[in-house]
Amino acid sequence: MAEKELKPICEDHVIKGRRLSNRLRKEVKIEVEKLVEKNGISPKLATVIVGADEGSQMYVRMKHKASNKAGILSESHDLPEKTTQEELLELIRSLNDDSSVHGILVQLPLPKHIDEKTIISAITPLKDVDGFSPANVYRLFYGSEDLSAATPHGIVTMLDRIGWNDLSGKHAVIINRSMIVGKPLIMLLLNRNATVTVCHSRTKDLPSFTRQADVLVSAIGRRTSDDDPFFITDDMVKEGAVVIDVATPHGDVDFEKVKDKALCVTPVPGGVGPMTIAMLLKNVVAAYSAQVS
Ligand code: GUN
């Protein structure tokens, strides 16, 4: 029987993040089945969440559901807002020592009384499936992408899959300088030979930068409803650019108008979000493989 032709990832100027994510998640599921058969041990992800932030709770629930669908076991540690830093460190140490746990994810942000850097640094790098620990950030600086941050890794994977895997001569403009998105993305884009500019809240004349972008990644995320004005309008986008909207739940980009000018643009929802989940699952499998083999 002829092999079924795969649908394109960019269709009608829209990058189908969900389509690509589903494809990657199926691949992960098949890989997990093989690994479990070979090793007799299932991969397991442990998540930690402190406080009752509804958005964070929802994202973590989605991560568990996707893990379980791919054959990855999961356990959640939901701690109250008043948890002390020492209590959280104690939990991290016990998860580091638990050989049945292969991946640890501490959902960010943490409450103000807890120092994020101290907590992230306490996760053993082998189990750091977010790629946020100092050792994994360092490895990314040296070009190793196997445990890199899920959201930026999802972004470059979409670029790779539309054929934009070598960005030589292309200008990538990132609007974000966080440890979760902007900073790791700089390295991932540099690895693909892009010329990279980073803009942020103190940048003057943002449109003068965005108009130069062959790849524009926007992660402003300050729109609170669908009625708020967009941050990235069509007049700020170069003809033929690839535009990636990281903001959620309300995208930064005027999708309907930008779509007609750009080569392709990611929708919200259905773009970057599903890719983040797929890349997390890939990281769990990579962490498991490094520990179990
Ligand atoms: N908060 C927002 N995005 C992320 C992420 O990718 N990982 C973690 N741990 N927290 C987040």
Image (cartoon, rainbow, N blue to C red):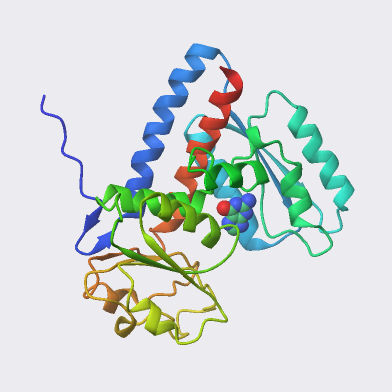
196 over 45 or under it: above or below: below
Q: Splitting the image into 4 quarters, where does residue 136 fall?
A: top right
86 over 267 or under it: above or below: above
Q: What residue is rendered at 50% in x and 41% in y? A: 66
Q: Position of residue 134 (x, y in %)?
A: 67, 46
Q: What residue is rendered at 50% in x and 68% in y? A: 249
**Can you see residue 125?**
yes
Task: Determine the residue located farthest toward the left in the rendered image.
Answer: 2
In the picture, the quarter occupied by the N terminus is: top left
Q: What residue is rendered at 38% in x and 84% in y? A: 208
Image position of 252 (left or right of 261)? right
Q: Position of residue 181 (x, y in %)?
A: 53, 59
Q: Position of residue 27 (x, y in %)?
A: 37, 32
267 over 151 or under it: above or below: below
Q: What residue is rendered at 50% in x and 79% in y? A: 225
Ligand 1's quadrant is: bottom right
Q: Splitting the image into 4 quarters, where does residue 123 fall?
A: top right
Closer to us: 181 or 60: 181
Q: Position of residue 24 (x, y in %)?
A: 37, 39
**Can you see residue 105?**
no
